[in-house]
Each structure stands twice: as C-alpha cells, then as structure tokens.
C-alpha cells in the first residue's frame, strides 16, 4: 500500500515538472538578433549597429552645465577657450579642494616630480628621466590651462593621466601645485597676522641642550 502511494506521488511530481517545463517558452532566446558589430544584409551600409543621430550627445538624467557627460563647459573639461589655455580656475577652489589636490598629487605626481614638486621623485633618483620642477620660471608663470592640458594629454615622457584623474581633480591638483609654488617664494608677511605667531620657531634658551640631529627644535610645530 505504501509503495503504491509513493509511486503515485512520484508520477504526480513528474507530471507537474513536465507541465512546468512545457510552459516555458524560448521566444526571447530564439528571436533573431545580431551580435555586436556583426554584418547585416538588412541595412544598406551592412552594419547591424545603427549610428547615432547627428547631434546626439551622451548625458545623464539631469544634464546641465555641471553634467560630466554633457561637458558643455569648454574651459572646465579642456583647460582652453578657443584653443587658448585659460588662466583662471573654472571651478571654485577652497581649502578642501587644495587638500584633495594634495592627496591626488601625492598618489600620481610624486613618483616623478617629488613630494615638493622639485622634479626629484623616487623614479628619477633611480635613473628615470628627469621630471620638470614646478619652480622653473616658465612653469611658475604658465597659465593653469597648460597644466590641465599636460595632465590630460601628456607631454614628453609624461603619459596622459586622463583615465586616472577626473577633470575636477585635475584642477585641484593644479591648485595644490600653485600652493607649492607660492610657498617657495612666500615670506612671513604673506601669512595673515593672526597666524604668523604659530609659524615662528623660538630659539632654545641659552644653556639648554638642544635636541639631537633630525629632531625638531624647541617651539617648532610638530
């Protein structure tokens, strides 16, 4: 009796499975389709992929001048206006932007240009071609658009970093480079009066032993 019941259950389960499979249609799987870039006899140009309509531009849902896909701000995304390097930052630059630029600079630029931008990075010290120093008079007076163009397209032995550094981050890196250049020639009078005292290193009192080599002097900022 029990074997007969089990047999009925198995038969019922098998029938249900068969009906379920029979209900599955393969229309979507079996429909005519072309593989990407394959040839087609349907169109006169023999291409299955259709070209974009003239004037089509890539864009996101919102669009607008800040849309990184639309990129209608020529200065922001090329560093140029009418083919000439811009000399003004096309995005607002605040302290946080310079700090972001410093972090990108330390990652991508220091191997060749060094931490302080003097062109003596680690790969240069190991025999690679001498990198440019940002304190060269030509680069100190170069427009910011020149730096953007070099980061984007490369120059000489330097490759393009367009795939590594996003456009706005390129401007932040340039802002940090400008900060480095300014610090090289800055004097104490360039610092706001309320912050000057924090930069002054007081000499150690007479008779007091000074710290060993490499240690900060007394009163130095740490």
Image (tube, grey):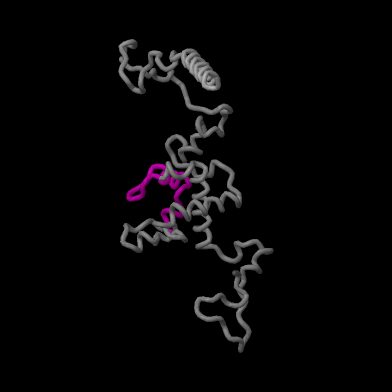
* Region in magenta: 135-160
Asked if residue 222 lies left or right of residue 47, the reply is: right
Q: Residue furthest front?
A: 1
Asked if residue 136 lies left or right of residue 180, the reply is: left
Examine the rendered structure and indicate whether residue 200 appears above or below residue 140.
below
Q: Say which quadrant the C terminus sits in.
A: bottom right
Examine the rendered structure and indicate whether residue 187 appears above or below residue 68.
below
Task: Point out residue 207 in the picture as x, y percentages from the top left corner.
Answer: 61, 89
Tell me where residue 91 sits by quadrant.
Answer: top right
Q: Nearer the viewer, residue 150 or 144?
A: 150
Q: Nearer the viewer, residue 80 or 108?
A: 108
Q: How many marks?
A: 0
Task: Point out residue 136 in the picture as x, y percentages from the top left corner.
Answer: 41, 58
Q: Residue furthest right?
A: 194
- The residue positioned 50% from the left and 31% from the top of the image is 69
Task: Point out residue 214 in the picture as x, y percentages from the top left corner.
Answer: 50, 76
Residue 13 visible at all: no
The answer to whether residue 139 is magenta is yes
Tell me where residue 50 sits by quadrant.
Answer: top left
- The residue positioned 44% from the left and 50% from the top of the image is 142
- The residue positioned 52% from the left and 42% from the top of the image is 168
Examine the rendered structure and indicate whether residue 95 appears above or below residue 14.
below
Q: Say which quadrant the N terminus sits in.
A: top right
Residue 155 visible at all: yes
Task: Point out residue 94 in the picture as x, y percentages from the top left corner.
Answer: 60, 49
Examine the rendered structure and indicate whether residue 49 appears above or below residue 63.
above
- The residue positioned 39% from the left and 61% from the top of the image is 122
The answer to whether residue 50 is magenta is no
């Amino acid at each position: 009796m029990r074997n007969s019941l089990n047999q009925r259950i198995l038969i019922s389960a098998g029938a249900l499975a068969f009906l379920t499979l029979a209900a599955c249609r393969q229309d979507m799987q079996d429909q005519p389709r072309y593989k990407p870039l394959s040839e087609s006899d349907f169109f006169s140009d023999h291409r299955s992929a259709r070209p974009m309509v003239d004037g089509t531009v890539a864009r996101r849902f919102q669009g607008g001048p800040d849309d990184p896909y639309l990129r209608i701000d020529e200065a922001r995304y090329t560093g140029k206006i009418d083919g000439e390097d811009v000399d003004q930052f096309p995005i607002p630059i605040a302290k946080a932007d310079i700090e972001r630029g410093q972090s990108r600079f330390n990652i991508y630029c220091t191997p060749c240009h060094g931490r302080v931008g003097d062109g003596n990075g680690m790969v240069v010290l190991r025999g690679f071609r001498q990198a440019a120093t940002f304190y060269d008079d030509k680069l100190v007076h170069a427009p910011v658009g020149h730096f953007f163009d070099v980061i984007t397209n490369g120059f000489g032995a330097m490759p393009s970093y367009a795939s590594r550094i996003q456009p706005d981050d390129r401007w932040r890196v340039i802002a940090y480079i400008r900060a480095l250049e300014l610090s090289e020639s800055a004097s104490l009078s360039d610092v706001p009066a309320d912050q000057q005292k924090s930069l002054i290193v007081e000499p150690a009192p007479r008779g007091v032993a000074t710290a060993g080599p490499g240690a900060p002097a007394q009163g130095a900022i740490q």
